[in-house]
Image (cartoon, rainbow, N blue to C red):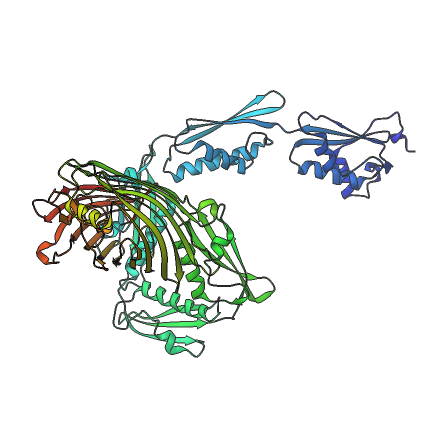
Amino acid sequence: MHPLFAPSALRPVAACVAVVAAAFPALPALAVEPFTVSDIRIEGLQRTDPGTVFAALGLRVGDLYSDDKGAAALRALFATGLFKDVRLEVEGNVLVVIVDERAVIGAVSFVGLREFDKDTLLKALRDSGIGEGLPYDRAVVDRAEQEIKRQYLSKSLYGAEVVTTVTPQERNRVAITFTMVEGDVARIREIRILGAKAFSEGTLRGLFDLRTPNWLSWYTKSDRYSRTKLNADLETLRAYYTNRGYLEFNVESAQVTISPDKQDITITVTVREGQPYTVTGVRLEGDFLGKEDEFKSLVRVKPGEAYRAEDVAETQRAFAERFGSYGYAFARVEARPQIDRERAQVMLVLAAEPQRRVYVRRINVAGNTRTRDEVVRREFRQFESSWYDGQKIKLSRDRVDRLGYFKEVSVETNEVPGAPDQVDLLINVAEKPTGNLMLGAGYSSVERVALTAAIKQENVFGSGNYLGVEVNTSRSYRTLSVSTVDPYFTADGVSRAVDVYYRTTRPLNSIANTFSLATVGSAIRFGVPFTEYDTVFVGVGVEQTRVVGNFGLPLKYITYATQYGADTTIVPVTIGWSRDDRDSGLNPTRGGLNRVNLEMSPFGDTQYLRTNLQAQRYFPLGPRFTLMLNGEVGVGSAFGGRPFPVFKYFYGGGLGSIRGFSQSSLGEIDNTGAYLGGTKRLNLNTELYVPVPGSGNDKTLRIFGFTDVGNVWGDGQKITGNSLRASVGVGLSWISPLGPLKVSYGVPVRNEPNDRIQRFQFQIGTAF
C-alpha cells in the first residue's frame, strides 16, 4: 500500500483535485487508488437532512470508490444548490464528506411598497428562487432587484429606487429586505408629431392611447409612458396613413426624453408621409387550387380607390382562411404592390403558395386551471384525426370565447416533428371569475329606492353548469328564485334548465293596500341546438297563484277571483327559438339577438296563450361608435270563454323597457288607481354608444344616448300612435369588476298626467 494511504494518515481529497484527476488521468500523483468504502461520514450539516446528501452522493457502504465516482459525487452535490463548498476526505476506508452549507433565506420583507401587491410580488420572487426556506444566492437577489426596478419603470416611476439589505440570522439564515423609494409617477407632458402635412397634428395625436394628463387620467392611466403602448400607437398611426393611400408612409424616429427631476416626459415622433396612391387593379399569381373565381370574390381591394392596407390585410386573411378550409394550414399569401410613383398608382399582386395539406393529430388545452377540459373540448367543431379546417377552428375558438369563462382564448397550430402532414392544435385560455353579484336600483318619489339583487355562478366547480339565485325587493314586485342550467345535458348539446320560484305581484297604487298575487312554481325546459347560432326551447311547469288580502283589491282582481277562485293552478307549456350571433355577450359591437317565446296553458284552471318576440341588433359605426336597435312585442290572449289571467299580464316602464318611467307603471289603470299592466306590450329602444372623452379607445367605459318608445295596453284598448310613451336620455356604461354597469337618466317626452316618472335608474351585472 502506498504510504500516503497508510491507516495512520489523514488523506484529503479536495474537490478540485478529484475533478482534475478525473479530467487528466495522466497525472498519477493526484490519483487515489480505488478502495472499498467501509463507512461514510458527513460533517458540516446544520439544516440539510443527511438523506439528501446520501441520495445525491451516489455511493454506498460496500461500493468501490474511484476518482471518477468521487468527481461525479462532487458534481451531484454541487448541483443540489445547497452548498457553497464540498470536500471529500478519506480516513482509512471511511469516506468523509465535508460540506459548507449555503445560507437559507429566513424572511423576505418590503419597506415602502405601495405600487405592487405584496403577495403577488412574494409569489413572483419565489418563482425566481427567492423565498423563505430557499438557499440564498446573491446573484439571484441582484437580478431580482434589477427586475423590480424594471417593473417600476413600466409603471412610469422613473425616480424609483430599490435597495436590498441582507441581514444574517441564527443557524446560518439571512433576512432579505427590499426597501423602495417609489417617488411620483412621471407624466407625459407633451406629444409632438413632426413632418405631418396631410393631417393636423391634433388629429394624429387623437389616435394615440398615450395622452397628456386629463380629467380621466386617474382611471385610464393614459398619461403614463409605456414603450409597448408607444409601439402600438405608432402602428395605429401607420395604419391611419396606409388606409388612406400613403403606401410609403414611414416613422423616421420616436424620441422619448425625461426631465432632470424624472417627472415629465416628452415624446417626439418624426414621420415621412410620402404621396397617396390609387389602386389600378388586382392580379392573382401562384396556385389557387383551380378556384381563382372563388378567391377573387374574397378580394376587398377595389380598383380606382385609394390604397388601403386594412383591405389588403383582410384579403390576405380571407385567402388564408379559405385555404385553411381546404386543409392547407400553412398557406402563404403575399401582397406585392407594384408602384408607379410618377402616376401615383399601384397594381396589387397577390401571390399564393398553398404548401401542403395537413390533418389534425391532437388537440390540447392549456391555461384552464379551474374549468374542466371537456367543457372546452365540447365546444370544438374541429376534431382530432380529421383534415385541418380553418373555418371550423375559428368557429371553435369563437364558441369557447362565447362561454364567458375566459378573458382570452387563442389557438396555436404546431407542426408535428417528423410528420409534415400533421399538426397539433393548442387551445390557450386565461380563466376569469365567473361568479357575479348583480345589483339594480331605481329611485322615485313614490317607491323611494327599489332594489334587485342576484348571485350567479356560470361555471360551478368548473363544470360549465349555471347556478343562480335572484332576489327583488320592489314594493310592487318581489321575487325569490333559484335556477340551474346544464348546457350539455346530453352529449349532443341539449341543455336542461330547472327553475324554482316564489314571487308576489302588487300593482303600483296611489292608496295603501294589503293585497298581492302570490305565485309559487317550478319549471323544466330543454334547449335543442339546430345550428351554431340557433336553439329551440321546449319546457313545462306547474304554477299556483293565490290572491292574498282584500283591502284595495282592483276590480279586475275581484272579477278574476270570482270566476276562477282565489287559488289558481296552471300547467304552462313553453316553446321558443333563439338566435344569438353577437360578437360579445358583455360588450357587443356587431351581430344580433332574436328570440321567440310562446307560453300556453292547455290544462289547469285557465287556458291562455302568451307570445313574446324580440329582435336586437348592433351596428358598428366606425371603430369607436356602436348603434343598438331593440324591438320587443308581447301579446296575450285567452280561450275557453274566460278572460286572460291577470297574473300573466305584461308590464312596462323602467329598466329594460321605457326608461324615465317607474318600473311596471305603464298600462291600464284601475278604478282604485292601481297600475295593472296589460295584455299587449311594445318596446322600441335605440342606443348610441360613444367613448368617454379622455378615455381614448377604451371600450369598457362608454357613454350613450337613448330613445325609448312603447307602452302596455289592456283588453279592449287599441294600439295607437297617440297612446305611445316616449323618453330620451343619456347614460354611462362600464364593464366593472362586478359586472356590466349601466346608469341612465331619462326624461319623458310623451307622457300623461297619471304616469309615474322615475328619471334616475341603474343596474349592474346585467346587459340591456
* Viewer-nearest residue: 209 or 556: 556
Q: Is residue 198 visible?
A: no
Q: Residue at image x 20%, y 36%?
A: 514
Res 13 seen here: yes
Is residue 755 placed above or below 144 in the rendered structure? below
Q: Nearer the viewer, residue 644 or 456?
A: 644
Residue 37: name its quadrant: top right
Q: Where is residue 345 shown, x and y percent of the image?
A: 28, 71
Pick the front one: 319 or 715: 715
- Relative height, residue 683 to residue 503 (above, below): below
Residue 571: percent from left, percent from top: 33, 54
Residue occupying image coordinates x 38% and y 74%: 295
Q: Tell me if 492 is positioned left or right of 16 in this view.
A: left
Residue at the outermost bottom position? 290
* 351 versus 409 height, above or below: below
Which of 641/531 is in front? 641
Quarter of the picture containing the N terminus is: top right
The picture places residue 324, in percent across and down from the top left corner, at 45, 68
